[in-house]
Amino acid sequence: MGVAEDIAKLELDLRELVIKYEQYFFGIEKREPLRLLDTVERAVRRYQNVSIPNTSQRFKYDSLVATLSVHKQKWIRTNRLIEEGKFQRDRFRMSLHQAEKTEKGGKAAATPPPPSQESQIDSVFQQYVNARLACNLPVDNVTRDKVAEAINRQKPALMQKYGCRDVDFVVVIEGGKPSLKARPKTS
């Protein structure tokens, strides 16, 4: 293969590698794509000390190497955060998983009744407390009444704004802090 074909293959492999790592971090792929990473790194090393006379090919090669370097730093940082338990998606998912465990441990295995307004507020409150604990924030000043008041205060305005029958509230973590987000229910 010539230099142009190698650079084109490197570009395709790098795109696939970025996609595989995103799938890995989202939990779609179970294993880190280390073989593909090794293949891409070998392709990069092949032309590392070789003079590429064509300027456009040299520019393309250098930009691909820089892209790989930036992505590798991001992947290393994200893997380190996952290992430390500080990765946002994992922390929130872990707190929800812990909440489910405590709910299942305290209740019988009977089918739950359909969710009412109070049980929704209880659920959102528990998720909010778990999210604050996962973010190492104090929960002393957080009460169920404050969360219920915030939900009941915002709900009518949101229903009118979005023209929907009901609004569900979910807890999300943004910038290391949990917050309530409204999701309009259309059906």
Image: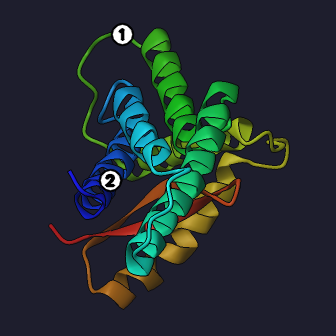
Q: Nearer the viewer, residue 69 or 59?
A: 59
Give how far across and how far down residue 8 sits, in percent: 26, 61
Q: Residue at x 66, y 30 (%)?
A: 85
What's under tag 1, amino acid-wise? Ala
Residue in the picture at 36% in, 10% down: 108
Tell me if residue 149 comes above or below residue 32 in the rendering. Answer: below
Count residues near mark 2 (Cα–Cα under 10 Å), then give few for <14, some for 14-19, many for 20+.
many
Residue pointed to by mark 1: 108
- Which mark is first along the chain, 1 or 2? 2
Label 2 vs label 1, nearer the camera: 2
Task: Report the Cα–Cα distance between label 2 and label 1.
Answer: 56 Å
At a point 14% along the width and 66% down the height, the residue shown is 187
What kind of residue is marked 2?
Leu
Q: Secondary structure at mark 1?
A: loop
What residue is rendered at 25% in x and 74% in y? 165
Residue 52 location in percent, x, y?
Answer: 44, 65
Q: Which mark is residue 124?
A: none
Residue 110 vertical placement versus 75 (above, below): above
User: Which residue position holds label 2?
Assistant: 10
Above or below residue 104? Residue 82 is below
- Binning the other alpha carbons within 10 Å of mark 1 as few (below 14), some (14 to 19) or many (20 upward) gives few
Pick the residue in front: 169 or 4: 4
Report whether 91 appears left or right of 158: right
Between 85 and 12, the residue placed more toward the observer is 12
Asked whether the viewer can see residue 32, the reply is no
> In the rendered structure, are the residues bearing label 2 and label 1 in contact, judged by CB atoms less than 8 Å apart?
no
Q: Secondary structure at mark 2?
A: helix
